[in-house]
Image (cartoon, rainbow, N blue to C red):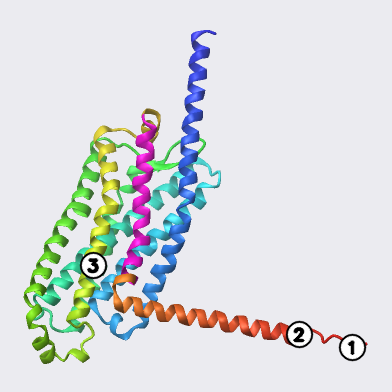
Amino acid sequence: MNQSELTTILSNQSQANRTSAFQFLQIAQAFFTLPSFLSIILNSAILHSIAQSKEMSKSPTYYLIGNMVASDLATATLFMILPIITLFSLPYVVADVICRILSLVTGMSYMASVLSLIAISVDRYLSIIKPLLLASRSKKLRIFKCVIVVIWIISITASLPFIYLTGALPGSTNSCALIHRGVIGLLFYLLITILLYIIPIIVMSILYYRIYQFLLEKTKEVPSLEAKEGHSKKFLDTAKRKSLIRTLVIVTGIFALMTWPFFAMILGMSITGITIDELERTSLFLFILCTISVSFTVFTPVVNPMLLIKYDKNIRTRTTVLYRRLKRRVSGKNKISASYNTTQTPASSTP
């Protein structure tokens, strides 16, 4: 066996191993459909609950929470579509266009979710520590509607570079991946890591810590304050405020824990200049680690609604009512169907 034949065999074997690894990645992506489907159901239920509640729909805080939930819903929908698309053998050009569009929309919805979390923390800080700054709820609601528009404008604009920095990898799998673009890619990923992870974590941590300190100092004054403010008539009394703050702190903490592996991955790949296919060839362990880091990000839209339903009393009450209403409706339809089938069954004749 000469040198050229040996080189050809090794090249074919390397290509086969690469294809097998990316096929494993596609199989892993297929399992994203289940948590994504669950996320779509939970986030849709929360959005419906907020929209149908007179108190929650007029609350600036829940308006921002609804925007965050809508962003998570968009992300979950995309992660449910992506594995379905990868099951089909598409031409490279079509796969590349779909990859870039999905990357754009995913980045847009993720950025909107992060910016919504920051806006929620600012809203809670102003409502609790500086309540007179925006005393009018209607005025505050109009301001935060404008904030939501600005959030989406920023998210769309900041996500446009993903069209250039992502694409389908040529080959039998046409897998969607980050493409190394040198200094441009490094600067962009460094910028979004600072703006979408480091700064938000610092800002939200400071604001929630100051809120915690304020509520701790006011604990002894709660009975007299609530008596003056009319405890029974307030939508968000002191106890509900504490519960809501606890919920938002937990959501923020989970966000920090579940997204840092993804930012670490994109920064590492940008600094080293190693693409995902080169990483698969050099270290299968790091390749699988990157897959896990993306998986953590996928599960964020699933965990957030679960936390909201578990820890937020208003959302939990409304979603429970929605669940019972749907259950009664399904049960009623089953009873009607059973009754109809019974009446349509011919009576047996007696000899």
Mark 3 burial class by Cα count in 10 Å: few <14, some 14-19, many 20+:
many
Which residue has dot 1 on it? 350
* Quadrant placement of the N terminus: top right
Task: Nearest to the eye among marks 3 and 1: give it.
Answer: 1
- Please report the residue visible at 30 percent of the width from the left and 66 percent of the height from the top: 68
Residue 114, image x and y in percent? Answer: 25, 60
**In the rendered structure, are the residues bearing label 3 and label 2 in contact, judged by CB atoms less than 8 Å apart?**
no
Instruction: Write down the region rendered in magenta.
Output: 283-309
Task: Nearest to the eye among marks 2 and 1: give it.
Answer: 1
Type of the residue with mark 1: Thr
Which residue has dot 2 on it? 344
- Could you say whether the residue bearing mark 2 is in a helix, strand or loop? helix
Q: Nearer the viewer, residue 217 or 169?
A: 217
Residue 48, image x and y in percent? Answer: 39, 76
Which residue has dot 3 on it? 248
Question: Residue 199 lies in magenta, yes or no?
Answer: no
Q: Is 176 left, or right, of 313 in this rendering?
A: right
Mark 1 burial class by Cα count in 10 Å: few <14, some 14-19, many 20+:
few
Residue 174 can be seen in this image: no
Vertical order, 207 against 81 (above or below): below
Q: Is 61 left, or right, of 180 in this rendering?
A: left
Type of the residue with mark 3: Leu
**In the rendered structure, are the residues bearing label 2 and label 1 in contact, judged by CB atoms less than 8 Å apart?**
no
Vertical order, 192 against 57 (above or below): above
- Could you say whether the residue bearing mark 3 is in a helix, strand or loop? helix
Label located before the other in sequence (3 or 2):
3
